[in-house]
Amino acid sequence: MMKNNGNEDDVEQLLHTYEQMAKIREFEEKVNELYMKALMPGLAHLYSGQEAVAVGVCEALRRDDYITSTHRGHGHCLAKGASVERMFAELLGKEAGFCKGKGGSMHIADPESGNLGANAIVGGSMGIATGAALSAKMRGSDQVAVCFFGDGAVAQGLLYEVMNMAALWKLPVIYVCENNNYSEYTHSSETLAGKIADRSRAFGIHTVTIDGQDVQLVQDTMQKLVERARRGEGPAFLECLTYRYYGHHVGDINRTYYRPKAEEQDWRENRDPLKLLEKKLIDQKLTDYAVLDRINSDVKKEVEAGVQFAINAPYPDPSEVTEDVYA
């Protein structure tokens, strides 16, 4: 039962936030299971551990605001409003998927929820987000565009081209760097010189670095950046310090060779975003374990139903192979 401490609307919002993160975590666990059972084609890059970034950022956005995503984008898609059923259908190559089963894990897009697409090219969506922000400004809209990318993408020259344009033209775009310390199989200390945040500051872009495991901090910080962008004050850069629990992709079974086991254990036990929010809810007597257990149970049922929907859905007809392509 929910306690009376705190504003009821605020508590409901926190429970919704917890549910969104739990859904992403459960979704990714099921993706891992499907992949290991050879039921899912292609590759999968799991988002587990970084849920507070996707949820915190997207909770600060409107449905008509834009996001662009990455090869590790399931969490972004779900946080922006994608349905579990259609997500799984896309992953399994089924016609009911967001891209009719033709995009797969790394190319999910849902324009209706403002998701302009994930991208298998590292940094590939940076120009798309910046273009969307330019479009919003030219149309006189107060929409905001958000570009998610990892610390490895900071090495891409495209980022500096678009940040330069965004700063010059005061575009309503927010660059969200999910700094999980690893670029594929290499620690960022071996690939990046200096501090990531200094790169955006060099363009005069408003820059903030925060703990990406604290979902309330992410949302509160993002809310300010979004309001700033809507006022026409230009781009921002948000660096979220986070961690991915699994390897670079599902088949990456050698992560213990390039990542200390104790490091992974510390993040899972002491800096897990779900555990941190759960502790806050319980310690502040905003809810109890029965409510959280019910949320987790409902999430598991929703995810399992999504899997069954996707398994039972038909594949696209082979005659459609030349549709939805440019050449």
Image: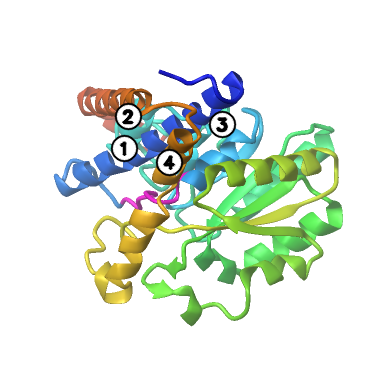
- The location of residue 58, given as percent across then percent down, is 58, 37
The label nearer to you, 3 versus 4, is 4
The residue shown at (45%, 54%) is 120
Residue 79 highlighted magenta (yes or no): no
| For marks 3 and 4 on the same chain, the one whose residue lies earlier in the sequence | 3
Q: Which residue is mark 2?
A: 296
The label nearer to you, 4 versus 2, is 4
Residue 284 position (above or below residue 249): above
Please tell me which residue lies in front, 54 or 6. Answer: 6
- The location of residue 44, given as percent across then percent down, is 32, 50
Q: Which residue is mark 1?
A: 26
| For marks 1 and 3 on the same chain, the one whose residue lies earlier in the sequence | 1
Question: Residue 279's mark?
Answer: 4
Would you say the residues marked 1 and 2 are in contact, meaning their CB atoms lie under 8 Å apart? yes
Q: Quadrant of residue 187?
A: bottom left
**Crowdedness of circle 3 by 10 Å Cα count: few (<14), some, many (20+)?**
some
- The location of residue 30, given as percent across then percent down, is 25, 39
Look at the image and give the residue range highlighted in magenta.
Answer: 44-51
Q: Main secondary structure of the magenta part?
A: loop
Would you say the residues marked 1 and 4 are in contact, meaning their CB atoms lie under 8 Å apart? no
| For marks 1 and 2 on the same chain, the one whose residue lies earlier in the sequence | 1
User: Secondary structure under badge 4?
Assistant: helix
The residue shown at (35%, 41%) is 25
